[in-house]
């Protein structure tokens, strides 16, 4: 019998290959739900927490979101945040979700405006010459 699943980089396997759209705060639920409905293969994970909570409750919600995000049935995760919630999901070990969002948004604008190419944003400038012909319209 052959297992037709998806092997993850950490060795775990999933039987589904969804993109998880996780809301980090109740106020972002509608946006997360709309994104998931619009993207084939996406699944929204919503909750009614994230604002004005005690530290114990914030820790519990954070653990739940991290657990969902690490599930082997998810190939990728999109966190939908307002930036004002109590939940702080760490990125790259030290970067908070609002800081990562600002950095990624700035990179997206630099790419969309034509100021930088995707390769430049990713740091691939040493192995080839990159030419930016003009702004993207």
Image (spheres, rainbow, N blue to C red):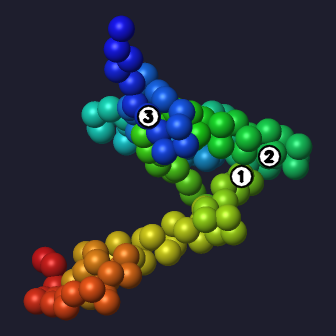
Pinpoint residue 90: horizontal percent, then vertical percent. Answer: 66, 60
* Residue drawn at point x = 32 percent, y = 32 percent: 41
Residue that carries the numbered disc 2 in the rendered image = 58
Q: Name the residue under label 3.
A: 7
Residue 115 in the figure: left or right of residue 47: left
**Answer yes or no: do the residues labelled 2 and 3 have beta carbons within 8 Å?**
no
Q: What residue lies at 28% left-to-right and 75% top-to-bottom?
A: 118
Residue 53 in view: yes
> On residue 16, which mark appears?
none
- Specify whether 64 is left or right of 37: right
Residue beneath disc 1: 87
Image quadrant of residue 110? bottom left
Q: Which of marks 2 and 3 is nearer the N terminus?
A: 3
Question: Does 84 appear above or below 123?
Answer: above
Mark pair 2, 1: CA separation = 6 Å
Residue 44, position as x, y percentages in the image: 47, 33
| Of labels 1 and 3, the one closer to you | 3
On the picture, is 125 further left or further right than 19?
left
């Amino acid at each position: 019998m052959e297992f037709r699943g998806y092997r993850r980089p950490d060795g775990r396997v999933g039987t589904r290959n969804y993109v998880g759209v996780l809301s980090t705060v109740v106020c972002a639920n509608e946006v997360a739900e709309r994104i998931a409905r619009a993207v084939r293969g996406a699944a929204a994970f919503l909750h009614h927490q994230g604002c004005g909570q005690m530290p114990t409750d914030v820790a519990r919600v954070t653990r739940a979101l991290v657990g969902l995000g690490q599930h082997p049935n998810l190939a990728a995760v999109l966190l939908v945040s307002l930036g004002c919630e109590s939940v702080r999901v760490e990125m790259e070990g030290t970067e908070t979700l609002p800081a990562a969002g600002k950095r990624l948004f700035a990179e997206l604008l630099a790419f969309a405006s034509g100021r930088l190419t995707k390769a430049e944003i990713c740091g691939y400038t040493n192995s080839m010459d990159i030419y930016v012909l003009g702004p993207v319209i």
